[in-house]
Structures are given as structure tokens and as C-alpha cells.
Amino acid sequence: MPSAAWCSDACEHHARLPQGVRAEDLRSSAANREFPLSPGGKGGKGPGVSPASHARGASLLAVYFAFAAAYFLSYFYRTANAVLSPRLTQDLGLSAGDLGLLTSAYFVSFGLAQLPLGLMLDRHGPRRVEGTLLLFAAAGALLFALGQNFGTLLIARGLIGFGVAACLMAALKGFVLWFPAAQRPAWSGWIMVAGGSGALVSSAPLEAALHWTDWRGVFFFLAGATLIVALALWRTLPTGHDDHPPSRAELLAGLVQVLKSARFWWIAPLGGLGMGGFMAVQGLWSVPWLMENAGYSKEGAAGVLLAMSVAQLAGYLALGLGASRLESWGVAPRQLFLFGFSLHLSALGLMLVAGPGWSIVLWCVYGLAVTCNVLGFNVLAEGFSDRLAGRASTALNLMMFAGSFLSQWGIGVVIDVTGAWAAWTPAQGLRAGFALLLALQVASFIWFVWGWRRHAGGQR
């Protein structure tokens, strides 16, 4: 990246710069790490000079697609067990609690990685961190494909979760480092389009693929695809990220600052129980719910999951296209975040009382509404400097995945306990688990609104 001396020299020889290029722009580019949509293009606020981008020909779109491919795989890994669960149960003889624990092992390792991940991203940058971690995901996928017992699959699932832990956070950190600030909410929407696409492919298309191969074949393929994406990240992302990376003491002090922030604790429960609860439902309990409570076959349930994923993808597309415009009209990310969560709660509540004929409509609304949850990262980031972006985002992501683990495992425990103690059917146990999740989400929603109105005053 440009050194301070180089920028100073450019300022002293302003008259020698090409027409339309200002020394102020060069200084801004060096500080913000912005670079253009094409070499010499118009992606940033200035000319976007970046040796890293010119050396590798990296553009905003190339960087986006590298991040997007990784997040596609991360989301596919996260949600595939919803379709694979009947086959895993049949092959391994798992109980509902075992299945919940196996699937949630992804969330445990993913969540435990978040706080150290934030420190690594802020010190070493997205390229080195994400490119390295994906190698663990590839190894986990290979081990899952070869596993012959529950213990091996549990370890493999944990490796996968650890390996994809940076896929969203590295992208958000990269947007802060290299993308214009005004475009970041839109790019956040676009990266979620990639995740939504992964969820879509892990529904009916995955069910169709299982007519040609088994779940082991799927994970052999995923191992190879993950390795290819890891190599693509190493080749595509800019090599530099900070001329003066923070020391370990500064990193830890920044993390403490995030965790002591009232802003963080207003948002964290809503993120953990909202997005976390949705990931638990989408990633495992959606298909059992549709089969037990709505009378769908495995193929029919996968079709509803596909429709929900399409709605989710449409929501992320709308967010990517419209977030910046809505903000220019005075609609703050916080307002859109709350609107989406209100719709999310309404859909989940109606699932508990509506008849099976409403299933596909309500699940589509559920998938559409959850897309606004990604704006929680933008709402949080507005309260911190760019240098704290990695730590703030990963701390919130930790809460989301802790919520995912507790929700996914907890619903399985509710099914087992109500079945053993009250002789409830799986359908009744699922309904009880979903009702408990809804109650916790409503409480977190009230906490966020109350906290913000009481303490935030005129903040966004």
C-alpha cells in the first residue's frame, strides 16, 4: 500500500499529477483502502489508487465474487442438514437430540471462532484469514464424507463450522477496507444474496441430487469446491490492508470497548435470537416441521424450503438494490431492521396457529423478512470506527451463532423431553419448541426498542 512518505511527495508535487487527480484523493485512498471498479475507474470517492489492486487486477466486482463464492458454500453447509437429516437419521440411528447436536456442532465451532477471528481480521486482513480457514472446512467436508460413526461426523461438522467462520465477517471487513462507505449497506445486501443462493441450492436441488448420489458424495464434492474457493481468495483479494496494524494490546482493548458498549448489548439479543433462531429452523427443523405439522412428504417439504429460499434471495436482492436509495430518502438501517423483524415475528407466530394450507405463504414471508436482519451489522458498525469493524461484527456474529446453537439443540431437547415425559408426538414437541423460540424473540425485540428509546436519544 502507499506509504506516508509517498503520499507526502505527491502532495508536494501536486502540479505533476494527471488532470483530475488530486493529492487529497490519493491520501484518502491510502487511508481508506478504496480502489476502483476497474483500474482507473470510478468505484471510490477518489481515483482509488491501490498497488494491491493494480498488481492483481482486483476490482470491486472480482473481490465481491470471491467473497460471494465462499459465503455461498458457508450457507450451503449450514442449511444442508435440513434435507439430509432423514438420511443421516436412517443411516446412523440418531435421535432428535443427537441430530440437533450434530447439526449445531457447526454453530458451536463457528461461534467460538468469532472473537479471535475479529482480532485476526483487524490485524491480518481478510485474505490471509479467510483463505487459510477455508482449508479447515475442506478437510472437515472430506472427513464428513468418510465418517462411519456419530463421533467422527461430529468432529467433521465442527471443523466445517470453524473453517467457514470468516466467510461473512471477512466480506464485511473487506467492504469497510476497500469499498466506499455509502455503498456498504448495498454490498451487505449483495453478499447475503450469495448466502441466500446457497440456501436455495441446499433445498430442492440438493434433494434432486440425492437421486444420483448419497450424502457422502455431496460432501466429497463440497471438499473439492471449498479448496478451489480458498485458492481463489488467495489469488483475488488485495494483499495489504493496514500499514500500521494494531498491537495485541490495542486489539484486546478494542474488543473490550465493543463488549462494554451499550449499543452492542441493545442489538446482541435481537441478533442472537432473531437471525440465530432463523438459522436453527432453516438449517434443521424446517423439514421436520413441514412433514409432522403440515403433512408434506420429504420432497414436498424440500419444495417449500426452496420457495422460502427464493423469497429470501429476493429479499436480499431488494436490499442490495434498494438499501442505499432508502437511506437517501431518510429510512435509516435501524428502521428497516425493525420492520423486517416485526414481519419475521408475525410469520413465525402465524405458523403456530394457521392451517397447513398457509404453510408455503408463511414460510416465504418468514424467509423474506429475515433478510433485514443483516442490517444489524450496519446498525452496530455506525457506533464504532472502521478499525474496530472486525471486532464489532464478529462479536455480534458470535451472539447469532450462540443463538443458533441453543435454538437448534434446544428444540431437539424439547421434542425429546416432551415425548418422554408427556408422551407428546413429534408434531406437538416441534410446536412447543417453536413457541418457546417465538417468546424469546419477542422479548429481545422489546428489549431493543426499549433500550434504544431510553438511551440512544437522537442516534440513528
Image (spheres, rainbow, N blue to C red):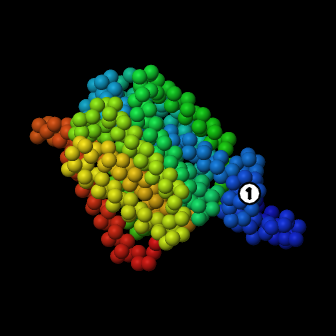
| Residue 33 position (above or below residue 67) | below
**Does the image show residue 18?**
yes
**Which residue sits furthest right?**
16
Q: Residue most toward the bottom? A: 458
Residue at 67% across, 44% down: 236
Is 124 placed left or right of 412 in the picture?
right
Quick one: 254 or 369, which is closer to the camera? Answer: 369
Residue at 32%, 63% in the rendered image: 445
Q: Is residue 392 visible?
A: no
**Which residue is rendered at x = 38% and y = 63% of the image?**
339
Left/right placement of residue 347 relative to residue 220 reads: left
- In the image, residue 396 sits, relative to residue 419, either above or below, namely below
Q: Count of labels shown? A: 1
Choose between 431 and 400: the one closer to the eye.
Answer: 431
Residue at which label 1 appears:
41
x then y, percent, for residue 329? 51, 70
Q: Quadrant of the N terminus?
A: bottom right
* Element marked by disc 1: loop
Above or below, 219 relative to 77: above
Q: Residue furthest front?
A: 357
- In percent of width and height, residue 164 lies at 50, 42
Crowding at mark 1 (Cα within 10 Å: few <14, some 14-19, many 20+): some
- Residue 209, horizontal then vertical, whole percent: 44, 27
Residue nearer the viewer, 451 or 248: 451
Identify the image quadrant of residue 451.
bottom left
Tell me the residue at 37%/40% (across/down): 305
Q: Amino acid at mark 1?
A: Gly
Residue 414 pos. (x, y %): 21, 43
Q: Is residue 352 above or below residue 327?
A: above
Residue lying at the far left in this picture: please name it: 422
